[in-house]
Image: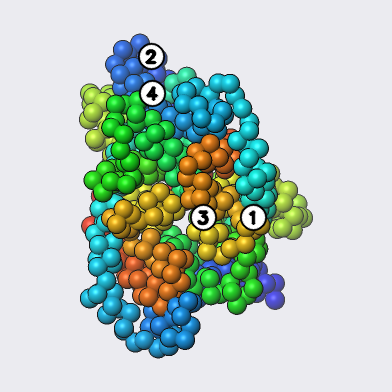
Amino acid sequence: MSADVMIRPGTRVVPDGARRRKRRDPGRVLRLYVPLGMYLVFTLVPFYWMLVFALRPAGSTDPVPWPITFEHFETVWNDIGYAVFFKNSVIVGVWSLLVTTVIAVMGGYALSRYRFRGRGLFMVVLLCTQFIPGAMMLIPLFSIFKSLGLINSLAGLVVADTVFNLPLSIILMSGFISAVPFTVEEAAMVDGCTRFRGFLAIVLPQLRPGLIAVGSFAFIHTWNNFLFALMFVSKQDSFTIPVGLSYTIGEYSADFEALAAGGVVAALPVVCVFAVVQRYLVHGISAGAVKG
Amino acid sequence: MTTMRRRAVPYLLISPTVALIAAFLVYPIASVAYYSLQHRNLTRPWADGFAGLDNFRQMLFEDEVFWHSLGFTAKWVVAEIGLQLILGLGLALIVNESFIGRGLARSLVFSPWAVSGVLTTGIWILLYTPSTGVLRFLGQPEAAVLGNPDTVFPAVVVTELWRGVPFFAILLLAGLQGIPGELYEAAAVDGAGRIRRFLHVTLPHLRDAIVLATLLRGVWEFNNVDLLYTLTGGGPAQVTTTLPLYVAQRAVDSKDFGYGSALTMAGFVILLFCSILYLRLSRFGEER
């Protein structure tokens, strides 16, 4: 069992030889595809059911949405006000994404590249924030935002969401930055680049997966945040999608078509973003976890 | 001068984070402690004032909802974490194998993670409502699952599993990818079967990932308010009210900030105590 006879498959858990052998293994179907299929049904039936309601004509009870109609989307978009909610959610989501990413790159760079006094404490504080419940911060944050005039403003939501996105984003980002070898940066500095120029020219381009992972993470969280938006915003023209949706659940509980169409509007952006960035996210968590 | 400036760089880089955390996390926590000793209700400003331990006395000795919410919170967290661990580990092991269409399969099974608690409620209301839901295709009697105290618990647990399992699986998948393939080769050479490889290679290496995932998810499920707030509102008859949901109801609905802060303090203490106990008992991060 010496190291030199072993294949080095990198981080892949199943080496090529074992894979070829497993293809012919009939137990693989039972072990792999049957549970996967069952889980896919559990995951996808709810999505499908929402689409059925959103797309079929009112009053229909068919389990297949045919003929397809977009009238429910017109209702929620124009009459219930999802056009406004959507716009608000995009504004808050994009701002929070930008602010979170920039600050996370700064903090992540400090954690990854510098050994400074208080670094350990900073890490502990970041980890501790994960234990702070958003619901429990509603009361004090409301008072603070009220005195800052941030109630009923989208800026207040950007601030609150950024604060809660930041700690995990910094930890993730420091993992990504550590994966970029420091020697390349050093070489640039020897060639006369300032540290900042070197960072922009050398590190930032290689940081793309990290920027995508952290940015999308921040966007999805902000897009989905309900409690802050519910508590800090009471004017309907500042509602975000989750608040709008919660009122659709409450007020139109008989109108399942509107609920479903609103749900599709709420789901579409995040599910699309997630489908694209899912692999970066898994990678990012491993990178962050490896660094500790 | 230059060395001093160089030393200041990391502090400058973390200063925005420190400022934001201090202003919007640390200061608020301190103010919760302060409010919890006050009578403070936005709907009754004339009765505001120093309360001493009155809020805590009321909470501990007069408030049945508080005690009931503690019991339900425990039941909710244990059920969610136990089931999410089993399903999430299974799912992570499956999508860690290589097969055709793995990328697509991962995107699909992980996708509910990206969905908000409110949207999860919206979707599952469509499934659960007697006249329109899918349960009628399973021969389920035409009963309101969410309105019945006997069926509401499994119904909310399954709903949260739909959204919660994916992230558990993502965390564990990240852990699985950190296990060197050589270990499996070596175990196979030594004649270990699939089950023994799982027990002796996979599980020990996943230990820290599992502890961290259960802890993180445990805290999240403890704090999970969006889903229960919109799906059941804590009902029927408060049977699905968790402690944070009770805080949110007090804060959002009745604007009772003083009493809500006392409840919040109770939540902090319980969460902190349970987390430390869990980390101790699981001996997280210790060399074995």
Label 1–label 4 contact, CB within 8 A: no
Callout 2 crowding tier (Cα within 10 Å): few <14, some 14–19, many ≥20: few
Label 1–label 3 contact, CB within 8 A: no
Callout 4 crowding tier (Cα within 10 Å): few <14, some 14–19, many ≥20: few
Label 1–label 2 contact, CB within 8 A: no
Residue A269 or residue A279, whichever sits in front: A269
Work out whether mark 2 precedes mark 3 in sequence or the reverse, and give the earlier one. 2
Q: At 49% from the left edge and 77% from the top edge, which residue is drawn?
A: B42
Q: At 48% from the left edge and 50% from the top edge, which residue is drawn?
A: A250
Is A33 positioned to the left or the right of B119 in the image? left
Work out whether mark 1 precedes mark 4 in sequence or the reverse, and give the earlier one. 4
Q: Is residue A247 visible?
A: yes
According to the image, label 2 marks what residue?
A23
Callout 1 crowding tier (Cα within 10 Å): few <14, some 14–19, many ≥20: many
Q: Name the kind of residue labelled 1 in the image.
A: Val
**Residue mark closest to the camera, 2 vs 4:** 4
Q: Name the kind of residue labelled 4 in the image.
A: Gly
The numbered mark at residue A226 is 3
Q: Name the kind of residue labelled 3 in the image.
A: Phe
According to the image, label 4 marks what residue?
A37
Q: Residue furthest front?
A: A59
Marks 1/2 same chain: yes
Q: Chain of mark 4?
A: A
Residue B139 or residue A182, whichever sits in front: B139
Callout 3 crowding tier (Cα within 10 Å): few <14, some 14–19, many ≥20: many
Q: Is residue B169 above or below residue A292?
A: above
**SS under mark 1:** helix
**Residue mark closest to the camera, 1 vs 3:** 3
Marks 1/4 same chain: yes
Work out whether mark 4 precedes mark 3 in sequence or the reverse, and give the earlier one. 4
